[in-house]
Image (cartoon, rainbow, N blue to C red):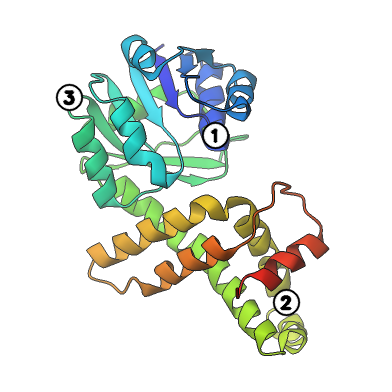
Amino acid sequence: MATIGVLHPGEMGAALGAVLAAAGHEVRWSSAGRSEATARRADGAGLGDAGTVAGLTRRCDAILSVCPPHAALDVAREAAGFRGVFVDANAVSPATTREVGAIVEGARFVDGGIVGAPPRAAGDTRLYLSGPAAAEAAALFATTIVATPVLSDRVGDASAMKMAYAAYTKGAAALVLAVRALARESGLEEALLADWDVSLPELPRRSQQAARSAATKGWRWDFEMEEIAATFAGAGLPDGFHRAAAELFRRAPRIDDASADEATLDAVLRELPR
């Protein structure tokens, strides 16, 4: 069993921490500068408080970084000097991942890419891993419900896997929102929805699901779209679609209620062209 630190436990990080704790690991977090909501999530997941990030790095064998993509580099800087296994499991491009690895030089760095929902049952979550120390990170989850496929010993491969997966799932959400917004602005939304009911009956529901995601998660999905765009550009492919998706998610109004009703979601759709 290992002592594992989680920086910083949002919904996904807390769920991964709970899974590791259930497997018998001692799992800790750092409360310094964090919100009450984060503290509640950490407490609910059974994570012990190390106080500061410095305290966490002194006490832990491994650290798992799971934060909004725009914060990945800053979180790595907090842990600079750590000498254990450092898993960067953030939704960032391979280039950003390599920057993180340079910041925590001296740690046994592992590139991670999370695909799926926060783990509740086997099959929910895949934590793709790559890098020379990937097998060490995979071993931490050996008796858990989280699958940990090791892709290669190359830092960047796990991040590229995450970027490719999210390029479709979240990119498709942006596309259906943009199409519906165009129809609305053209005065043709009802006609489009009527045609979708005949030709693509899943799209009205998917557009509402996309509106819900944009309103509750768009504040971090926009950064993820920028990282995906950078991944496309790094591969010599056009990056404009996902930069446009980032702008669309930035425009989405914010709501806190993930169970918002149809009227609220319709208001989200009306705001997108602005």
Residue 80 spot, x, y in % from top left: 25, 25
Front one among 120 and 42? 42
Q: Do tag 3 and tag 1 residues touch (Cβ < 8 Å)? A: no
The tag earlier along the polypeptide, 3 or 2, is 3
Task: Name the quadrant containing residue 215.
Answer: bottom right
Mark 1 Cα-neighbour bin, 10 Å: few <14, some 14–19, many ≥20: some
Asked which secondary structure carries label 2, the reply is: loop
Residue visible at 34% across and 20% down in the picture:
62
- Mark 3: few, some, or many residues within 10 Å (few <14, many ≥20)? some
Q: Amino acid at mark 3?
A: Gly
Q: Amino acid at mark 1?
A: Gly
Q: Is residue 212 left or right of residue 262?
A: left
Could you tell me which residue is drawn at 48 percent across and 16 percent down?
A: 27
Numbered disc 3: secondary structure: loop
Tell me residue 121's x, y (percent): 62, 35
Kind of element beneath mark 1: loop
Q: Is residue 11 left or right of residue 108?
A: right
Q: Residues within 10 Å of mark 2 (few under 14, many from 20)?
A: few
Q: Residue at x 59, y 16 (%)?
A: 46
Question: In the depicted view, which residue is nearer to us: 10 or 145?
Answer: 10
Q: Which residue is mark 2?
A: 201
Residue at the spot of label 3: 106
> Is residue 69 visible to the viewer in this orientation of the structure?
yes
Residue 131 visible, this orientation:
no
* Whether residue 181 is situated above or below residue 128 in the rendered picture: below
The x and y percentages for residue 202 are 70, 72
Mark 1 or 2: in front is 1
Q: CA distance from mark 3 to mark 1?
A: 26 Å
